Amino acid sequence: MESVISIQHLSKSFGNNEVLKDFKLEVFKGENVVVLGKSGSGKSVLIKCIIGLISPDQGSIHVLDQDVLHLDTDEMDLMRVKVGFLFQSNALYDSMSVRENLEFPLRRHGKDLSPDEMDKAVKEALESVGLAHTEYMMPAELSGGMKKRIAIARTLILKPEIILYDEPTTGLDPITGKEISELILEIQKVYKTSSVIISHDMHCVKIVANRIVMLIDGKCYADGTYEELEASDDERIKQFFD
Amino acid sequence: MSENSFKRFLSDAGDMTGFVLRFFRELFKPKQEWRELLRQCYYVGYNSLSLVGITAFIMGLVLTIQSRPTLVEFGAEAWLPKMISVSLVREIAPVITALICAGKVGSGIGAELGSMKVTEQIDAMDVSGTNPFKYLVVTRVMATTLMLPVLAVIADAIALYGGYLGANIKGVVSWELYWTQVFDALSYSDLLPAFIKTYFFGFAIGIVGCYKGFNSNKGTEGVGRSANTAVVVASLAVFLIDLIAVQIADLLGFT
Ligand SMILES: Nc1ncnc2c1ncn2[C@@H]1O[C@H](COP(=O)(O)OP(=O)(O)OP(=O)(O)O)[C@@H](O)[C@H]1O
Ligand SMILES: [Mg+2]
């Protein structure tokens, strides 16, 4: 199978705090890989390295056959069109309406769309998350679950090949969390994306994961399907399934 | 000052210098954000104009009323317009404008960028093909730098108008006479240094607000602190620049 993300020997520390130590990860085309780890284990640091927001101390990261650590600004922007990022805190622009939020990546990535095409792209992205009526609302008027959906729509609008989700269900109630998990599955099918999903919410993991990678002590501690890991005798793995 | 806080002060000053240098590096990089710059200029002007206007008016009025008795004592009442115009234009209007902008615009920038930072909006801009430093910092610093002189000139005019009303509360000075005296009193060497220093005031307010916001700590508490320290540091910077400006103007013979 074709590998879309390949990470080798990745290390990153902040001062004396060694967050990632010789971490490795391989993501194949079309699959949803969940990275499971405790709070503070460095999951956000890991995916921010993938998108080039944090530069690691050591190791290599290849995304869609490009070496992320040696791209210039323009090449990095091109890569970021193909890789969507859903932020843990949604990162919707407070000062812009939902519509402007969605238009922002389209405009800024220099896609020359006519007003009609822009309008169509916004409507389509909003419909695929089921929130067509919120176009002219401000982020402050949305509930937590709606914000998450809008953030997903803003990621989808560029039709990325890869989506990185940072804790998509954290802070949501179980029912909304389940809806978001199902939305992630649907996106995988409809848009044919490959995804890395950061999570420690086992309900979400169970729904979305094709494969799970465990991030413990900065290393890739285990790698397998939900069923395989659930059946493990290892104490540190079992903790997550209790 | 304990050794620790001294160290923190030094490293903060170092970071701040780095931030200023980065500003000048990014300023000339391609793809200027003209639209955003215009929007920010509008905000800076719009947000502070009424407050600057009211304060300038009151300062002009009060200064005149309070200066009169002293001048009367020396039989120099006729000098009233001359004296107040020099104090207002050279010192009071620019500094008051800068302090109001430090409070209103500086804290606004600190809070806005701080909350964008902690809610990852700055990272989101980065992954959306936008250089956040150029889009957020360069535009805001340029806006305060360009708008502060404009606001200061408006403040000059309003303060002098306040002075006219003040002069007419007890005495009588005709409109024509007042302005003739004011313009007689003011020379280039009064106007130029006062005007030039407002650019530096504006720059300081913008850069301090952006620096504090951009380097906000996690959490809403961090945002509050950014806004707060932005005002304190920017106000202090205004006085320091004022102090340096007066020395330089003196050296260059603008007296
Ligand atoms: N910019 C930074 N500077 C210094 N330390 C950082 C920075 N970013 C992260 N860290 C540290 O790295 C560690 C991992 O942080 P990270 O945000 O990746 O955790 P996480 O696994 O995403 O946790 P959570 O589930 O709470 O989001 C933490 O100890 C954090 O303090
Ligand atoms: Mg995280």
Image (spheres, coloured by chain):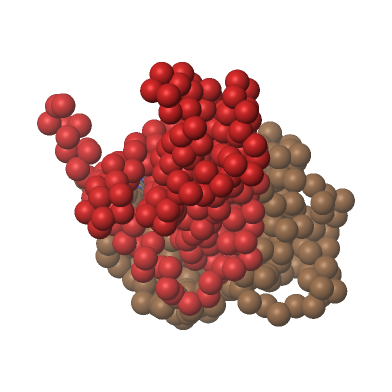
Determine if residue B173 is in view: yes
Above or below residue B135? Residue B108 is: above
At x 75%, y 78%, the residue is A113
Residue nearest the observer in this picture, A45 or B40: B40
Q: x, y (%) of residue B50?
A: 65, 38
Please state the total of marks drawn on the protein image. 0
At x 39%, y 37%, the residue is B235
- Give the residue furthest to the left: B3
In this picture, residue B175 sits left or right of residue A134: left
Residue nearest the observer in this picture, B242 or B66: B66
Determine if residue A92 is in view: no
Chain coloured brown: A
Quadrant of ligand 1: it is top left
At x 25%, y 57%, the residue is B252
At x 73%, y 58%, the residue is A100
In this picture, residue A167 sits left or right of residue B214: right
Q: State the image quarter where residue B1 is shown.
A: top left
Q: x, y (%) of residue B156?
A: 54, 44
Q: State the image quarter where residue A193 is shown.
A: bottom right
Residue nearest the observer in this picture, B246 or B24: B246
Residue nearest the observer in this picture, B187 or A181: B187
Q: x, y (%) of residue A18?
A: 27, 48
Q: x, y (%) of residue B39?
A: 64, 57
Chain coloured red: B
